[in-house]
Image (cartoon, rainbow, N blue to C red):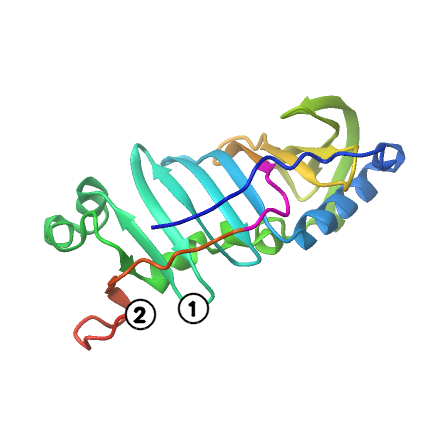
Amino acid sequence: MVAASFALAPAAGASNGIGALPAQQIVKKSIAATTTASSVTVSGAIATTSQTVSLHVTSAKGIGFGTFTYNGQTLTVVKTTKHTYFKATQSFWTTAAGATAAQLFANKWVISDAIGSSFASFFDTRQLLRTSNLTTSVFVKTGAATVNGQPAVIVTGHDKTNAASAGKLYVATNGPPYILRLAATTKGTNAGVLNFTNYNQAVHLTVPAHPLNLNSLGSGSQG
């Protein structure tokens, strides 16, 4: 149902000088570069106390497509400017909403903007990389690495108001200073690694045909 054509877009070119900047400036500039890119693919996994979520999402300023896997149960998602469409297995629906819902919706495309809101940040880097805690965080440059074949500077940070909140940011040192990897090292409730690839590639969406509209069940409205 979704068509896409893209290839890995390396942060090619001469050194961008980002590695010479103070750590906090690296973070600010990398977030600015990443959130202004026309598109990006984010993939990886996030663990919480209750579940592990794996994802592979290609997005372009709030629209896109991808898959999310919750403890072995996979959802396929298409997000347009108007709606969020997704398709899930019988097992997912049984766990999430019961046997009756599973019989009605398993392996069918549905629209649910309420459920879709939980995916929204993964389709918009401006939400995913929100910067509200920059002023309360401490950042330190902690070395260099190669991420998916691209050289990067590593910045490690933690929130002064929450000692358990910490992570590492890997920023491209060639070409635009894009974020290449975000690794959460938070203790207790959250941990995970997200990789950022395929910057500025064309994103082609195909809207699923004849979805069941859970926004307006009983009204006969679909779209």
Residue 132 visible = no
Q: Nearer the viewer, residue 25 or 223?
A: 223
The answer for how far apart the CA atoms under marks 1 and 2 are is: 9 Å
- Return the mark for residue 82: 1
The picture places residue 181, in percent across and down from the top left corner, at: 63, 33
198 magenta-colored: yes
Q: What amino acid is at disc 1?
A: Lys
Examine the rendered structure and indicate whether residue 169 appears above or below residue 112.
Answer: above
- Return the mark for residue 146: none
Q: Which residue is mark 2?
A: 223
Q: What crowding class fits label 2: few (fewer than 14 Cα within 10 Å), some (14-19), or many (20 or more)?
A: some
Question: Which quadrant of the structure image shows residue 218?
Answer: bottom left
Residue at the image position 77 percent from the left and 42 percent from the top: 176
Q: What amino acid is at disc 2?
A: Gly
Residue at the image position 72 percent from the left and 22 percent from the top: 145
- CB atoms of marks 1 and 2 within 8 Å: yes
Q: Is residue 125 left or right of residue 84?
A: right
User: Which span is picked out in magenta?
Assistant: 196-202
137 magenta-colored: no
